[in-house]
Image (cartoon, rainbow, N blue to C red):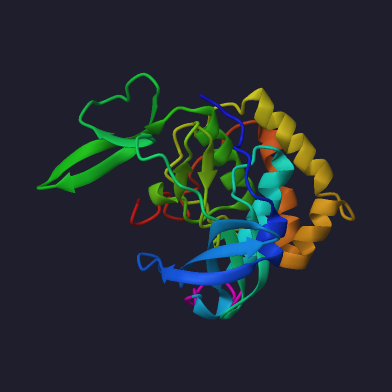
Amino acid sequence: MSSSPQTLPGAELLARGELTVRGRIREASNAVLYCSVAYDGREAACVYKPVAGERPLWDFPDGNLARREVAAYEVSEATGWGLVPPTVLRDGPYGEGMVQLWIEADPGARLLALTEDEEPGEGWKAVGEAEVGEGRTALLVHADTPGLRRLAVLDAVINNGDRKGGHLLPAPGGHLYGIDHGVTFHVEDKLRTLLWGWAGEALPAEAVEVLDGLDRALTPGAPLATRLAELLTGAEVAAVRARVAALRAGGHHPEPSGRWPALPWPPV
């Protein structure tokens, strides 16, 4: 089922509040700090990713993953789908970094599964075969939901190179959020995702409408285009515009290019 985003604290709290570090999320490859943020009588949990804690990547410039995370939020907001939690770029205890509202995921939601069946069951989409040990394989599937499909469209627009299962946060109430958008907006095709279930299928009408709106919002001088120019290079903004145009012209979900591994590793 599709759902509307829950009412969340706004970006003002994240941008202007006092950050207090409560701990570190050690599973992350870059420095990710769990924090509280308080301002004007309001308080919320958030994550803070300082630029100083970013691990250098061979294919992305150093020190700008935080800006890409903010850019992903800005594009998400422009779609009206609210797929990325409120995210800002600000100074913090360890310097400039990305601050994003913490979302508590619903532990009972099932978005990914492995099945020994040859075809996905009703309500599921096939991703591909996965090794499960001892020479055995199983079919990896993801749920066939409007929220995941919207996220697949957003990932195609922002050229997400790392859509893993752990980056999907189904919130109580059914709304879906996506996180960890540091490796996005590359000028080359880097799309790697677990959400290939709709590859080659026609885009739904709501996605076409959203892409039309993004095309207008990316016109030079428009607010979204101006904001992205503050966060990305000119070539990267032009590439976003080109991807939106290609999706509108083709009218289909993208398919793996074959020039780059289609699935992230590890998948979760």
Q: Is residue 243 visible?
A: no
144, 5: nearer the viewer:
5
Q: Residue at x 45, y 69 (%)?
A: 22
Residue 66 left/right relative to 236: left
Task: Find residue 263 and report its horizontal and vertical position in percent.
Answer: 40, 50
Position of 258 with respect to 201 (left or right) is: left
Residue farthest toward the top in the current orientation of the protein: 122
Residue 109 placement (x, y as % from top left) = 38, 34
Q: Where on the picture, by quarter, is residue 226?
A: bottom right
Q: Residue furthest front?
A: 41
In the image, residue 42 sits, relative to residue 176, either above or below, namely below
Please tell me which residue is depicted at 45% across the width and 50% down the height of the picture.
167
Q: Residue furthest right?
A: 221
Which residue does the image show at 36% across and 68% down from the upper left? 26
User: Where does the magenta region start and end?
Assistant: 55-64
Identify the residue shown where x is 69% and y is 56%. Answer: 11
Question: In this orientation, which residue lies closer to the viewer: 205 or 18?
Answer: 18
